[in-house]
Image (spheres, helix red, strand yellow):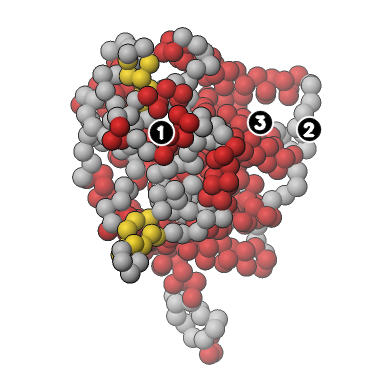
Amino acid sequence: MIVDEASPGGRRGLSRWSFVALAALGLVAALLGAFALRAWGEVGGTNSYALLADAFLHGRFDSPTCFDIDCARYAEKIYVIFPPAPAIVAMPLVAIFGPNASGFLILSGLMLAGVAWSWFGIAGRLGLGREARLWATMAFVFGTPAFYVGLRGDNVWFFAQTFGLLVSSVAVLAAMDRRLWLAGMMIGLAFLTRQMTLFLAPFLFALSRPRDARLIAFDRATIVDALRLGLPLAAALAVYLGYNYARFGSPLETGYGYIAAYPSGDDRSFITWRIEDLGLFSKQYFLSNVLYLFVQGFHAEFGGRYMTELLRMDPSGTSLLAASPFVLFAFYARPDAKLLAGLLAIVAAAGITLFYHSNGFIQHNVQRYVLDWLPALYVLMLPALAGVSERIDERLRLFKLLAVYAVGLNVVAFVIAGVTKGAI
């Protein structure tokens, strides 16, 4: 039992912070239960990476069909356009059970466990105590878009993001341990999953620098370090360029420009019209994307004659600051070279997607594209919780409250999506 300092005479009992911890455990248990139920009831034929894995197993790049609308129709063939690494992960599953295999949620659950392991280790290397490490890991996994993409890992987009987050998290951990070959291979795999993670590479180099070493130098040791990190990433880039050439006849043609030609008339949406009329990138997308990324709050839609019928969660999501307010602890980031490198990575990746035709639609209470750069922001943020002092204790208490709030929002959003039969 913990002494409640607010009670007369300091009676022994559960403190208010014990109840905060119990609330966190209950919310996490609810989310894990929802994950287990979805995994138990998973059906096959929903994840297009199974089709791409089957194509690889049969020595081709095209597929006879597609399980979603984000496929390309080119030269009278159908292509799953997404980068190839997650399909390689899925190949053993597909080799055994075929292209209609289920089991992707089990794989996603294992990946989320790997993400949690990575961030517990990263937090420790940044100097956080055991309690702070547990809370920081819980917040990252259950209070950001990480859990949402894992929960929906039976679909192609979310499976890719779960795997991409895993390998980019391992890359951060490897860079901090100065295991640069491993960091380079992991960020290379991340790039072959989510292209925007490429911008994390300079930040990983900054993380790997020895204490008191200059970020930019031309001595032999620095050049060797840059090569150890950069060569695996260059190999991944070469693989992707060759993959594009083999599919579409040009190393720079990713296939995204052809996806509007695939859906039938009944499956067309505003995304299709955007691509056809405005293009993959346009300044006209900026306002809605920036508001959804930074401002838009938790939004359940109501309708009916009296506007009392609960219709659905906003399928374009909730802003990062509203859904995961603990990321504001990044305000305490130390002003050093790592901060500069991290900010450049964040601005580059986030800035490009602000002009992209989609902000992550469909998604509930998250902005899932932030996972491409959230590892950099989280590394910059966590030192605010490192050390032992009264000031750090106060910060950790506030962090706990914000983390519980964020996880609670996810629970509420998933309940609403389930009740309204929204896609979760």
In the image, farthest residue toward the bottom: 8
* Upstream in sequence: badge 1 or badge 3: 3
Vertical placement of residue 107 versus 259, above or below:
below
Secondary structure at badge 3 equals helix
Q: Pointer 2: residues within 10 angstroms few (<14), some, or many (20+)?
A: few
Mark 1 vs mark 2, CA separation in Å: 48 Å
Q: Amino acid at mark 2?
A: Arg
Q: Which quarter of the image is occupied by the N terminus?
A: bottom left
Q: Is residue 217 left or right of 420 when viewed as pictured? A: right
| Foreground label between 2 and 3 | 3
- Front residue of 30 and 413: 413
Residue for point 75% across, 47% down? 335
Which quarter of the figure has residue 313? Answer: bottom left
Residue for point 50% across, 11% down? 250
Residue for point 70% across, 43% down? 339
Residue 132, given in percent of the width and then of the height, sits at 55, 57
Mark 1 vs mark 3, CA separation in Å: 34 Å
Labelled disc at residue 388? none
Mark 2 vs mark 3, CA separation in Å: 14 Å
| Foreground label between 1 and 3 | 1
Secondary structure at badge 2 equals loop
Q: Amino acid at mark 3?
A: Pro
The reply to whether callout 1 and callout 3 are in contact (CB within 8 Å) is no
Residue for badge 2: 214
Residue for point 44% across, 77% down? 14
Q: Amino acid at mark 1?
A: Thr
Residue 95, given in percent of the width and then of the height, sits at 25, 21
Vertical placement of residue 378 versus 173, above or below:
below
Residue for badge 3: 202
- Front residue of 199 and 73: 73
Residue 220, given in percent of the width and then of the height, sits at 76, 19
* Upstream in sequence: badge 1 or badge 2: 2
